[in-house]
Image: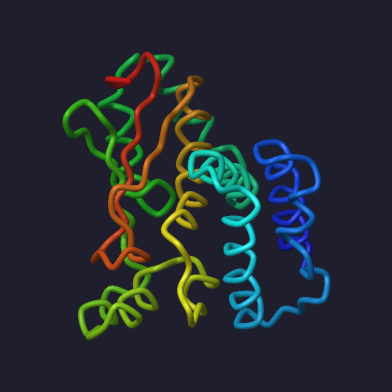
């Protein structure tokens, strides 16, 4: 359960930073009693998100908190893929060249493309066949979403929960381009959309 402890530490510290000292502990209250039962963690997470909304009424502050408690690409896959893209950008100075190389490694980076001056990432479904056969929002979420807690949720998680995925992309693009990246959720399965679509703008690189 080391991954959970790390995420709770991030969540607590970020909530204190953006919402006020002491609020983080109230948001993550009770997590120590959790086991590796994903269903139980998902139900606890539903309550934690409600507590976050109560403790931190400001939506922008909550967005920043969820960004900072996200999973991190380099912690899961190491930094080699990021470093290769960083070197490629330094050598070519070409955003298009880097995005093409990222698409060639779609298992790691997805298939990013440029649209109206921004980078677009559309998250590929986890199980395309199950998604095609899905008949409800719950079935679409279970088939498409990579987050096991979102899949196990029974009462639903708020849209801002997807800011965790925004944080994932933020880490990738800042690691490659060495500049601040703003990532927003444009479409989300949690919002009843058919897919998850993210818009990335990088200072000095895209139209940001």
Q: Residue at x 48, y 31 (%)?
A: 84
Measured as percent of width and height from the top left, residue 186 is found at 29, 48
Q: How many marks?
A: 0
Placement of the N terminus among the 4 image quadrants? bottom right
Q: Quadrant of residue 100?
A: top left
Measured as percent of width and height from the top left, residue 12 is found at 74, 50
Placement of the C terminus among the 4 image quadrants? top left
In the depicted view, which residue is nearer to us: 46 or 5?
46
Q: Residue at x 79, y 70 (%)?
A: 30
**In screen coordinates, is 116 left or right of 192?**
left
The way the protein has been coloured in the rendering is rainbow
Above or below: residue 133 compared with residue 161: below
Q: Residue at x 49, y 82 (%)?
A: 154
Above or below: residue 145 compared with residue 103: below
In the depicted view, which residue is nearer to us: 118 or 18?
18
- Residue farthest to the left, as pictured: 116
Measured as percent of width and height from the top left, residue 160 is found at 46, 54
**In screen coordinates, is 208 left or right of 27?**
left
Q: Quadrant of residue 145?
A: bottom left
Q: Quadrant of residue 26?
A: bottom right
In the depicted view, which residue is nearer to us: 151 or 100?
151
């Amino acid at each position: 359960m080391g991954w959970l402890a790390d995420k709770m530490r991030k969540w607590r510290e970020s909530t204190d930073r953006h919402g006020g000292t002491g609020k983080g502990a109230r948001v993550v209250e009770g997590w120590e009693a959790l086991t590796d039962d994903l269903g139980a963690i998902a139900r606890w997470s539903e309550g934690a998100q409600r507590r976050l909304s109560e403790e931190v009424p400001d939506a922008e502050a909550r967005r920043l908190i969820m960004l900072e408690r996200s999973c991190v690409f380099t912690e899961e896959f190491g930094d080699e893929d990021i470093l290769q893209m960083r070197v490629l950008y330094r050598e070519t100075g070409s955003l298009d060249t880097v995005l093409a190389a990222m698409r060639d490694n779609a298992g790691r980076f997805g298939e990013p493309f440029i649209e109206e001056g921004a980078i677009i990432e559309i998250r590929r479904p986890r199980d395309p066949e199950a998604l095609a056969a899905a008949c409800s929002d719950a079935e679409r979420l279970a088939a498409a979403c990579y987050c096991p807690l979102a899949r196990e949720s029974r009462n639903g998680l708020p849209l801002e929960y997807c800011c965790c995925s925004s944080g994932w992309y933020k880490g990738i693009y800042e690691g490659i381009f060495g500049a601040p990246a703003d990532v927003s959720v444009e479409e989300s399965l949690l919002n009843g959309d058919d897919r998850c679509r993210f818009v990335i703008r990088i200072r000095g690189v895209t139209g940001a």
